[in-house]
Image (spheres, grey):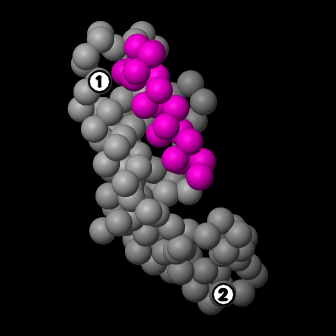
């Protein structure tokens, strides 16, 4: 997310308390512009408070029945075919595929995989 470079974003957020109202307002508008340009929203950028239920919370970590993760394996292959993944994401996807093969793929893994797919789709446009 080039518009959400962490260091630049933090610099802008720190400017929100600037004594010069014009500078603070300009920083706020730039933060808003970058969030919108990234295709994401505040809900995906900010974690819920500790103890607050999240509608997207993963299901309990019980392995899915054998054969139920075939679509997930195909999705992993599709995501791995993209050339825009960093090494850490590739490793996570490879580990998830191994979990499928070993019968250790859970509903929480599925939720993570589908959320990753959705985030990548936004970035890929």
Residue 54 in sight in this render: no
Q: Nearer the observer, disc 2 or disc 1?
A: 1
The quadrant holding residue 8 is: bottom right
Query: Compared to 3, does 65 lie above or below?
Result: above
Residue 115 coordinates in the image, percent (x, y): 38, 42
Q: Residue at x 57, y 35 (%)?
A: 49
Residue 23 among those drawn in magenta? no
Q: Few, some or many C-alpha atoms within 10 Å of disc 2 (few <14, some 14-19, many ≥20)?
A: some
The local secondary structure at tag 2 comes to helix
Residue 107 in sight in this render: yes
Q: Quadrant of the C terminus?
A: bottom left
Residue closer to the observer: 64 or 70 = 70
The answer to whether residue 72 is left or right of residue 11 is left
Residue closer to the observer: 66 or 32 = 66
- Return the residue at label 2: 23
Q: Which residues are magenta?
A: 87-108
- Return the residue at label 1: 69
Query: Compared to 24, does 65 lie above or below?
Result: above
Residue closer to the observer: 47 or 97 = 97
The answer to whether residue 73 is left or right of residue 51 is left
Q: Residue at x 59, y 52 (%)?
A: 87
The local secondary structure at tag 1 comes to loop
The quadrant holding residue 56 is: top left
Residue 105 among those drawn in magenta? yes
Residue 23 coordinates in the image, percent (x, y): 66, 87
Query: Compared to 18, does 48 lie above or below?
Result: above
Q: How many marks?
A: 2
Q: Residue at x 47, y 26 (%)?
A: 98
Going from N to C along the chain, the mark reached first, 2 or 1, is 2
Residue 58 coordinates in the image, percent (x, y): 42, 25
- Main secondary structure of the magenta stretch: helix
Q: CA distance from mark 2 to mark 1?
A: 51 Å
């Amino acid at each position: 997310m080039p518009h959400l470079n962490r260091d630049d974003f933090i610099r802008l957020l720190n400017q929100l308390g600037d004594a010069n109202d014009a500078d603070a307002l300009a920083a706020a508008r730039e933060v808003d512009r970058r969030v919108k340009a990234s295709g994401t929203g505040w809900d995906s950028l900010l974690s819920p408070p500790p103890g607050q239920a999240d509608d997207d919370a993963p299901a309990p970590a019980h392995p899915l029945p054998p054969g139920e993760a075939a679509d997930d394996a195909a999705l992993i292959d599709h995501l791995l075919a993209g050339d825009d993944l960093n090494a850490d994401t590739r490793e996570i996807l490879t580990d998830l595929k191994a979990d499928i093969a070993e019968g250790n793929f859970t509903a929480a893994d599925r939720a993570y995989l589908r959320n990753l797919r959705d985030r990548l789709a936004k970035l890929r446009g």
